[in-house]
Amino acid sequence: MLNALSTAMFALVLRLASETEDAPRGLLALAGHPRLAPAVAALFNEPARAWSLPDLARLCNMSRATLARQFQEKLGRSASDLLTDIRMTLAANELRKSSLSTGAVAETVGYQSEAAFQRAFKSYMGVTPAQWRKMQEPSGRDVFARPTAPADAKPARAAEADTQV
């Protein structure tokens, strides 16, 4: 049911966006652009690959300058920025959910050296991969749980009754 509702909502948003006179911007506009879609799909499907602007331009049958300009117009950022976003999101998720070493995560998302990955991650996320992983660990306590009272403690209402005269 939730899936059907979200699909319907997405369709309505797309319809509304297509009816405006302003040119749409963002990832959706980029993916919906018929000539740029192959580059976007390639970046998402193979983020670990060492993509270059000429490679992406060739996929889209465009010049490098045209591809760069189209990315900037549609997304407001470069293809390289999008690739970094994808890689850092994947890396953050991998660091959170697995026990892979930082070097293994770096390789998984397309970095040749762990040091380069650590610099990029810190620049993007504001913390090192190790700090990120530590921040994502469950603390072992439920913040919504009530504190447990010692077995010999009186319930709160009984304690209040003792103090009232």
Image (cartoon, rainbow, N blue to C red):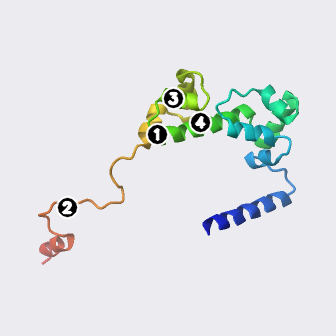
Q: Which residue is mark 3?
A: 104
Question: What is the distance, in whole Å, between disc 4 and disc 1 at their CAs?
Answer: 15 Å
Label 2–label 1 contact, CB within 8 A: no
Q: Residue 117, image x and y in percent?
A: 56, 26
Question: What is the distance, in whole Å, between disc 2 and disc 1 at their CAs?
Answer: 36 Å
Q: Going 67% across and 29% down the picture, which residue do you hit?
A: 49
What is the crowding at mark 3: few (fewer than 14 residues within 10 Å), some, or many (at least 20)? some
Q: Which residue is mark 2?
A: 149
Q: Name the amino acid type tagged 3.
A: Ala
What is the secondary structure assignment of the residue under circle 4? helix
Q: Quadrant of the N terminus?
A: bottom right
Corner quadrant of residue 145: bottom left
Q: Going 71% across and 66% down the picture, which residue do you hit?
A: 8
Q: Which residue is mark 1?
A: 98
Q: Nearest the camera: 7 or 153?
A: 7
Left or right of residue 125: residue 64:
right
Q: Which residue is mark 4?
A: 88
Q: Name the amino acid type tagged 4.
A: Met
What is the secondary structure assignment of the residue under circle 1? loop
Question: What is the distance, in whole Å, between disc 2 and disc 3 at their CAs?
Answer: 45 Å
Q: Residue 77, image x and y in percent?
A: 74, 37
Q: Going 82% across and 40% down the picture, which residue do you hit?
A: 36
